[in-house]
Image: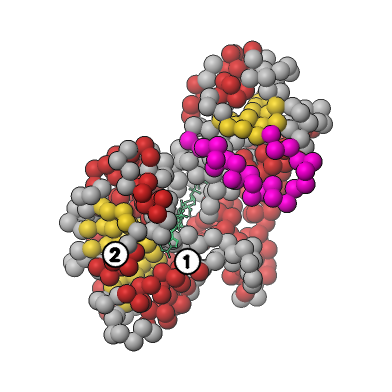
Amino acid sequence: MNIKKICCIGAGYVGGPTMAVIAQKCPSIQVTVVDLNEARIAAWNDTDLNKLPIYEPGLAEIVGEVRNRNLFFSTEVEKAIEEADMIFISVNTPTKTYGLGKGMAADLKYIELCARTIARVAKTDKIVIEKSTLPVRTAAAIKSILDHTGNGVQFQILSNPEFLAEGTAVKDLLAPDRVLIGGDDSIEGQIAIAELAFIYSNWVPQERILTTNVWSSELSKLTANAFLAQRVSSINAMSELCEKTGADVNEVASAIGMDSRIGHKFLKASVGFGGSCFQKDIMNLVYIAQSYGLQEVADYWEQVIIMNDHQKRRFGRNIVKTLYNTVADKKIAFLGWAFKKDTNDTRESAAIYVAADLLCEQANIAVFDPKVTEMQMKSDLDLVLAGCDETCSRDVSMQEDAYNTCKDAHAIAVLTEWDEFKTYDWQRIYDNMMKPAFIFDGRNVLDRKELETIGFIYKGIGS
Ligand code: NAD
Ligand code: UGA
């Protein structure tokens, strides 16, 4: 096979870890990850591996092994494109915040900019790979831009969506359930598919490398995220019913999960799913369905988001109601700010929305998260509180340790399922809190019996 140099545009949560693993498994290929964000590239190049821009278990070790061997991080986007045989586009595809499709459609301006840059600087034939999550048929737009350069360069466009989950990215990349490659039926298309499949075959078993047409591949990615998010909204819908009926959602999840057709995974009731992708990808799916006039399909998927918003809201409302209908001037301790454990990513974290609701009730909030900085937490809140008036409290701070965070608090809200929370000295935490001391476990991760024995009033989700 012919690939000697790979360029990846976008050094984010997908580009960084994915290319680190490709570089580790394909030592003869030079992999260069480029980004316009100079600070991010500088952080990827930091000699202190604790300062990489992304926290993922196992990632620093791999980057330490291959960086400057055959993995490079650079801001020289054009140079890396020009030299590469294969280009991964791994830039962000956020929800549009303006114009047609505002709040729903994917904003493809970063993708188009990549395509135009490739079209402008490429002097040799290239395989261009959509790694970002994109609306079905985006490859046609990229092809149209690339094919109109008039400089005779041949491009093959493949769709190779990424299925890694944050917090387990390295594990997912090293042993993926499947690698999906969508390409053209033409001979050139099939050769391009074979080139990419060959790269993955260095560590992924052949039977896990699935090839399809481009449109199926693009749509499979949106479908996978929609199905996963739907399961969370489904169990969360049942959690509310459990709270009214005396059923326990954990027991219901275990019972239904034993049905091999349903399976155990992704049935954990929670304060609501977060993360940069579930909401954006479902809204994108809703928009696509609407644009084809498929209103029932659009409504069906939109309900997953409506349920998730409801779950986040009712968690905050439940805190207020339980604390005797007022949290004004009361300290509420937040354990966790990231949208799930083992990541420093806070995008769309449920914690942001719960905090905003409680601040509007004039609560004081102290936050502890093992991986999130105060600056990040405040910038998350600034965006959500921008439309609120001056009656909303802004009394929120990030603490260095959990014990100080909970000191003198009226209640603790568990927003992320960090493993270390289970190891705390809960008696000590209880002794230093206001009484009665409440715990609202938004992840159902703490030991209810132990906490109730100590004296806490424990409120889980769905029980
Ligand atoms: P991200 O925001 O962490 O990273 C994207 C990077 O692209 C940024 O650093 C940005 O500066 C850079 N960029 C944007 N335009 C550029 C350009 N023209 N030239 C050079 N760099 C540019 O995003 P992410 O989380 O890595 O997600 C990337 C894509 O992958 C999205 O489409 C997302 O839906 C998809 N995805 C994400 C995950 C995940 O777990 N985060 C998983 C699977 C798929
Ligand atoms: C998700 C998908 O799992 C990945 O396959 C996909 O590649 C990625 O989106 C993407 O396209 O960005 P991610 O968002 O990183 O990955 O993490 P998940 O493990 O899916 O969790 C998402 C959210 O759902 C988290 O807030 C998590 O706490 C919540 N969740 C998950 C639950 O509340 N209950 C569950 O049972 C599972």
In the rendered view of the protein, which quadrant contains the C terminus?
Answer: top right
Front in this rendered view, residue 117 or 270: 117
The disc placed on residue 200 is none
Q: Is residue 294 magenta?
A: no
Q: Which residues are magenta?
A: 371-395
The location of residue 383, given as percent across then percent down, is 64, 50
* Depicted 135 relative to depicted 261: above or below: below
Q: Which residue is mark 2?
A: 80
Q: Secondary structure at mark 2?
A: helix
- Tally the marks: 2
Q: Residue at x 41, y 50 (%)?
A: 39
Q: Is residue 320 visible?
A: yes
Crowd around label 2: few <14 · some 14–19 · many ≥20 (10 Å): many
Q: Which residue is mark 1?
A: 110
Q: Earlier in the sequence, mark 2 or mark 1?
A: 2
Q: Label 2 amino acid?
A: Ala
Q: Residue at x 55, y 40 (%)?
A: 375
The location of residue 429, given as percent across then percent down, is 60, 17
Mark 1 lies within 8 Å of ligand 1 (Cβ measured): yes
- Location of residue 427 by image quarter: top right
Q: Residue furthest bottom?
A: 150
The location of residue 75, given as percent across then percent down, is 35, 59
The location of residue 118, given as percent across then percent down, is 35, 73
Q: Residue at x 58, y 13 (%)?
A: 428
Q: Secondary structure at mark 1?
A: helix
- Location of residue 253 by image quarter: top right
In the rendered view of the protein, which quadrant contains the N terminus?
Answer: bottom left
* Depicted 338 relative to depicted 328: above or below: below
